[in-house]
Image: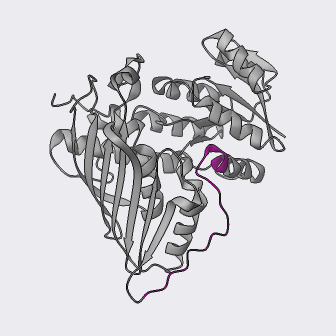
Amino acid sequence: MHRAAIVGTGAIAAAHAQALSDHRDRITLTSVVDVDGARARTFADTWHAPGVAPNLTALLAGGGLDLVHLCTPPSTHAPLALECLRAGVNVLLEKPPTLSLAEIDQLAAASAETGAQVATVFQHRFGSGAVRLREMIAKGELGRSLLATCNTLWYRDAAYFEVPWRGKWETEGGGPTMGHGIHQFDLLLSILGPWEQVTAVAGRRSRKVDTEDVSMALVTFADGTLASVVNSVVSPRQTSALRFDFERATVELEHLYGYRDADWTVTPAPGETVHWEASSTVTSGHGGQLTAVLDALDGGGVLPVGIEETRQTMEFVAALYASAFTGAPVRAGEIGPGSPFAERMDGEGTPW
């Protein structure tokens, strides 16, 4: 039986606790940490966790942990994850995993040194529809990928940004590109594979924030697929929508914060027959990814989505910002050590 702890008991922590509860035959929630001790105790009581630790250091000193779920604000992710890794404990990070590529590389170095691993919560990869689509692509059942669109059109009002760490480069790392659309375009990347070039724009259209509230990107993938990616927190009709046009069919997904199998549709090209068979109906929640994490822990394998896959998505984020703020296309691998966009997603500052 694996042993887990949750650090940070804000809203997203309940999704982690529920996933752990759903897998209680394989893993148990043993401890909870929060800066607010009373809130930690209430959370622990609600989810039947026997322990409450005053801080992460004390939690790790107690030993016996296999996995720490970090559900704290973004700016704390890297230092807390480093502390876990140096204690030899695996980490499951909420998004955004870090504030920069440089911090991702720090985690990678610590993981290589200690053998403990880091995975990022990109749960949309694990719904049955996404798994099925990747399998069909691998078997060549849809023909070549030609075109894709990825839209995260959400709405966050002024009150949402009254939380002190939101809307600031120093504490959130970015706007909807970093904190909202990242789930959809991570799914896009997991399906289409390596990207080659990004040409982007970003703007602060409405919200009183330091970051962008809208961004748009044109992306070229290694296989030649052309894609558009739009991220917004100013869109009253909210949707999360992905469309993939292949030679033999169009495959579409529309949902909001998590999808079911029924949210996928397939439209064959004229004269074509495509079989979209539901072998399972796993939703795109935390539970699906936790299943894969536990399988990796049991088998001694690499945690999904590990540091390498996480870095690919974070490099895409950095490239989008770099292109938007310099006005030039950015190619994969171009943002290396010493680049201002490796250290901060806003580089040397925004146009506004």
Q: Is residue 207 left or right of residue 45?
A: left
Residue sitting at the far bottom: 271
Q: Position of residue 249 (x, y in %)?
A: 42, 77
Q: Is residue 133 visible?
A: yes
* Figure quadrant of the C terminus: top left
Q: Quadrant of residue 29?
A: top right
Q: Is residue 260 left or right of residue 273?
A: right
Q: Residue at x 31, y 70 (%)?
A: 224
Residue 70, placed above or below residue 330: above
Q: Position of residue 337 (x, y in %)?
A: 33, 39
Does the magenta-highlighted stretch encompass residue 219?
no
Q: Residue at x 42, y 48 (%)?
A: 313
Q: From which residue to which does the magenta span run?
A: 272-289
Q: Position of residue 165 (x, y in %)?
A: 41, 20
Q: Is residue 335 visible?
A: no
Does the magenta-highlighted stretch encompass residue 279?
yes
In terms of depth relative to the viewer, which is nearer, 11 or 36?
11
Q: Residue at x 27, y 27 (%)?
A: 207
Q: Quadrant of residue 171?
A: top left
In terms of depth relative to the viewer, which is nearer, 268 or 236?
236
Residue 194, placed above or below residue 102: below
